[in-house]
Each structure stands twice: as structure tokens, then as C-alpha cells.
Image (cartoon, rainbow, N blue to C red):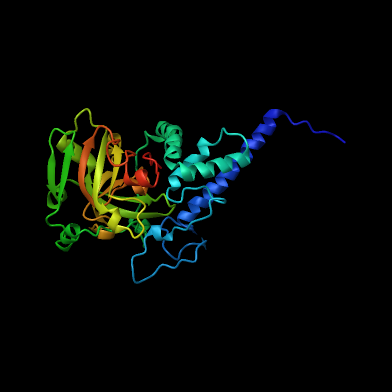
Amino acid sequence: MITLEYPLWLRATHFFNFLLLSLLVRSGLEILSAHPRLYWNDHCTPGSEWLKFTKKQRPRDRLWAASDEESSFPSAIALPGHEGPHLTRALLVWLSGLTGILIIHVVTTVCSRRRPRFVQKATQSITDPLRTLLFGHEISTQHYSHADISPYFWVNGRPPKQESYLAMAREQFANYSLEVSGLVERPLRLTLTDIRTMPKQTQITKHCCIQDWSGVAKWGGVSLHHILGLCHPLPAARYIAFYAFDNKSTSEPHAQGPGYFYGTIGLELAEDPQTILAYEMNGQPLPILHGAPLRLRVETQLGFAMVKYIRAIEFIEDYKTIGQGQGGWREDYQYFSQEAGI
């Protein structure tokens, strides 16, 4: 009998290849559970999928949001992270140095479920600086044509239910005003009419959701760079916080956290030429289901970073004093990463 003496480096390589591939499979299953349909196109129109792993049917008589598509795969099969697919992706990097495939899967499964905040912070400490270093300098230069606009654009989340918001909606937001405050030389209070009279920017871009669906739409609004030129942020300002009318405690039937939705972006993202406050979608006033009267568009980021139903903007030095201190509602309660670049 011939004994094959494989060198240690080769055995280690096979070990880690198998480890990472198995993690990749589990991660892929969890991502698939967030939107269990596969498409050959950018539009992700319901019914155009070539393969689906769900028996759910989109009802015609009520709102069916992208979040309603979510399924739950057992943690023994898919990586835990149903409430945060962003967290699932990041685990691939964090676990690469551990030894023992079975032990790693057990430890990560238990830890992700019992200490999600720890996992969130640990993975972000590794992956976020790397992503910023490699891709943080990228800007959006998307220029799709009108022919590329999706015939159907998924709705994610439900609109606010507060009477104050509904009253504004009934009046086509005639009495809406946007407050711009914080670390600025000149605080602003802008009506929708004020914003519409500012230089208008239109762009046809692709929206990429963390659930792995996408859609192309034409957006019209005012450049956030223009707003910065009006309010003049102070040198201490490093982030911009966007506060929404959307109280998740009342708007979502199965809210994964309390309070009003908010999000933050770094000041450098405001300077991207395609970062705008949108008040139009496909040539029409922004629909309520997609964030009326005003929503953020940051075309280098995943969709969850683009806050809808904006009621106020604040320039801040750090986001750790807001909410749970993670940089956004989804970061606070669904353990997403504040770094959402694509």
C-alpha cells in the first residue's frame, strides 16, 4: 500500500476551502430566504422569476411588500441572520481563522442567536474598514435609459399611519416642511415648494435591495450637495442623520423594533453627484408607498440606507448618541452594518 503524504500547507488549504465553501452555502441559503425568487433580469417583476422557493402568492387586494416575501430557514441549515442578511455576509470573513468545521458552525450559530450585537460589532470591525478602503472612493455614474425602467418596483416597508402624516398626504403635502439643523452655520426650514424651486436633478438608476432584488427607476429631486451649500456644515459635522415620519411600532404588522425610522450617512456620501433628495419617481410625484414627500437616494448604497418619508435632517459629529447608537434603525434592531456600499 502506498501512503500519500500530502504536505501540511495543502491539507490546511483544503480544510479552509471546505470551511469557507460550507459557510458560503449556508450564507447563500439565508440570503435566499430573504427573497426566495431568482430572476434573469434587473426588474424583478413578480411572475418573471425563473425559479422560486416559496409557496407565497402576491395578493391583488392589499399591499404586498418585499419584506412579506421573507421566509425562515432553520438555523441548522442556514446561517442565523434572518433579521439581518447583512450580518450573514460579514460572518464569512470573521470566521475564516477558526479551527474545526463542526465547532465553527455550532459556535457561530449559537453566538449569532444569543449575542447578535457582539457579532455585528466584531464583523464590522473587520469588514467595514476593508470595504471603505477598497470601494469608499467610488462614485455613482449610472445612466440607464427610459427603456430600462422596471415595469414593477417592489415596495419595501409600509407607510406611516400617524394622523399627522395622513393629514399632510390628503393635502398633497402642501403644509410639509423639512427642518435642516445640527452642526450647521445656517439652519433651514424648507417647504416642498421651496425644494421644488431648487435646481432639479434627474437620474435613471438601479436600486439594489439587501434582499437581493433590484429595480430601475427615474428619480427627480434636489442634489444633497446643493443643500450643503445652503446650510454650510461646520467642521465638526461628520455624519448626516435622516429622520422619518415612519413609526415602525405602528406601521409594521410585525415590527422588529420600536420607534421612528432613521438612518445616517457619512458626509462624504452627500458629495456624490447622484446623491439626491427625491420628490419624483418616473416623472410623477413621489408615491406614498415609495417614500413621499421626500426620500433619500444614495446610488452607491444598498436600498435600506435610503431613508423614506423624511421629516428632518440633522448634521452630527457621531451617531452613537442616536437610538441604539449603531447608525440607523435597521442597524439598531436588525443588526445591519452602517457601511452599506455596493
Does residue 232 appear left or right of residue 290 in this picture? left
Image quadrant assignment for residue 146: bottom left
State the quadrant of the N terminus: top right
In the image shown, does 238 or 38 lie closer to the viewer? 238
Locate residue 334, reporting x and y percent.
39, 47
Locate residue 69, reporting x and y percent.
43, 60
Locate residue 164, reporting x and y percent.
17, 57
State the quadrant of the C terminus: top left
Residue found at the very far bottom of the displayed protein: 61
Residue 155, can we see it? yes
Does residue 203 appear left or right of residue 209 in this picture? left
Residue found at the very far front of the displayed protein: 114
Total marks shown come to 0
Image quadrant assignment for residue 317: top left
Does residue 260 appear left or right of residue 34 in this picture? left
Does residue 199 appear left or right of residue 105 in this picture? left
| Residue positioned 19% across, 57% down in the render | 165
In the image shown, does 10 or 195 lie closer to the viewer? 10
Locate residue 129, reporting x and y percent.
41, 31
| Residue positioned 47% across, 44% down in the render | 114
Image quadrant assignment for residue 17: top right
| Residue positioned 30% across, 35% down in the render | 320
Above or below, 236 against 84 in this view is: above
Residue 287, can we see it? no
Residue found at the very far right of the displayed protein: 1
